[in-house]
Amino acid sequence: MSPRRKSRIVAADPDWLSLPLDKLTLTRKEGFAAFAETPEPPRPPELSVAELKSLDPPELERHNLARRRFLANLRPIKTAQAEAVFADLEEILDAAVDQPTWEAKSMAAIDAFPGLGKTTLGLAFAKHVHNTLIGAHGRFTEAGHERWPVIRVGMTGDTRVKDFNWALLEFFAHAGRNSGTANMFLTRAMNCALACESRVLLVDDLQFLRFRTTWGTELSNQFKTIANEFPLMILFIGHELRDKGLYDDPQLARRITPLELAPFTIDDDAGRHQWRSFLLALEQRLPLADKHPGMLADDLSDQLYARCSGHIGSVMSLMRRGCRRAIRTGDERLTADLLAGVKLDEAAEQLRKQWEALFRSGRGTSKPSGSGKR
Ligand SMILES: Nc1ncnc2c1ncn2[C@@H]1O[C@H](COP(=O)(O)OP(=O)(O)OP(=O)(O)O)[C@@H](O)[C@H]1O
Ligand SMILES: [Mg+2]
């Protein structure tokens, strides 16, 4: 980035840059609260091409900056897959909160390929729990402690029991997180969870845990202790959790409800309808002056599917990059030509040719029957 460009961003965006790091990271409760409670960034005004042309350069720059920020923070789209898993999570949590304290609490695991929106969905659920419980019961518990309905821990390459317990304390910024044994850390964390009436523990990137090692087994055992002793539901998120051994332990296999998040599929009309509904919702969000209804769902459906093989992460990257390009070039709309020049992730590129060949041959389509242009 050139110094000139950087200084313009600094000048235009001082609030973001002055936020303390705590508020930007989800490893601390303050960061999580900022994530859960900060209002969505306002949608930039929808300008026509003529209106865009009438802006003077500083106005245009401000408008483009607002559009870039909006694109970077697009709210999650309610896909059919995500809504189904969300409903399952609500049901599991509802049942768990009313269980007697001495009964082992429920656990759930979202296990799906990278880039399918697991973290997005887990965080959307966590945000919902945070805001619902604080809205219903207030920011403080009856005993006068801060209410923290959700605790979030992200796993890293070599998280062991003590690291995990440290991360629990770190979330609460607990003064006792720098000295003590793993068990002492766990007891302190449990006291925090009890005092703050926590109801969900979200453990993201669980695939990093090597279950079939000594410390993997130790941490798995500790998950059982947490389920037994803590008053909360554990939500694991990761990929290949089954193959990596999450369910090797019979007790965990009995207690964890596995949930899947599937890519969009176009094998049947039901799947193709879901893909189309997603594209229709997505195209409405795009802040481009010359877009039109059907720009994605009618004109680019096959191409987008071929580019991302139904993976939401890849299609969202394509949208963010494509829109930025369309703003920069002045095209102000997405076309096959423009998107063809946008680079994407390796996994998506690997599968692209197969899908393109299928659509070209006429043996497959991503559009449901009766959806207009084909
Ligand atoms: N429902 C959604 N609506 C809009 N964008 C989404 C949605 N789900 C996921 N995305 C976007 O897709 C990208 C990948 O999502 P996310 O990080 O949640 O995937 P993941 O399954 O957790 O991947 P990984 O296994 O790599 O951690 C993100 O940029 C996210 O913003
Ligand atoms: Mg993730």
Image (cartoon, rainbow, N blue to C red):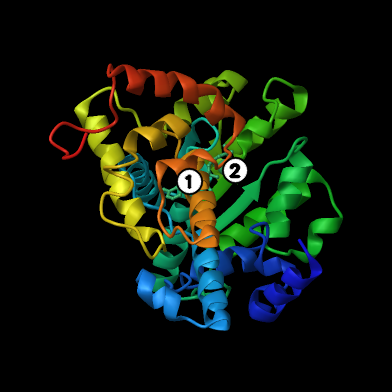
Camera-side residue: 226 or 203?
Answer: 203
Mark 2 Cβ and ligand 2 under 8 Å apart:
yes
Contact between labelled residues 2 and 1, with CB atoms less than 8 Å apart:
no
Disc on res. 338: 1
Quarter holding residue 343: top right
**Residue 214 position in % (x across, y down):** 76, 23
120 above or below 214? Answer: below
Quarter holding residue 131: bottom left
- Position of 78 with respect to 184 (left or right) is left
Camera-side residue: 92 or 292?
Answer: 292
**Residue 2 position in % (x across, y down):** 78, 64
Disc on res. 204: 2
- Position of 346 with respect to 266 (left or right) is right
The C terminus sits in image quarter: top left
243 above or below 195? Answer: above
Residue at 43% over, 53% down: 125
Mark 2 falls on what kind of element?
strand
Residue at 75% over, 36% down: 157
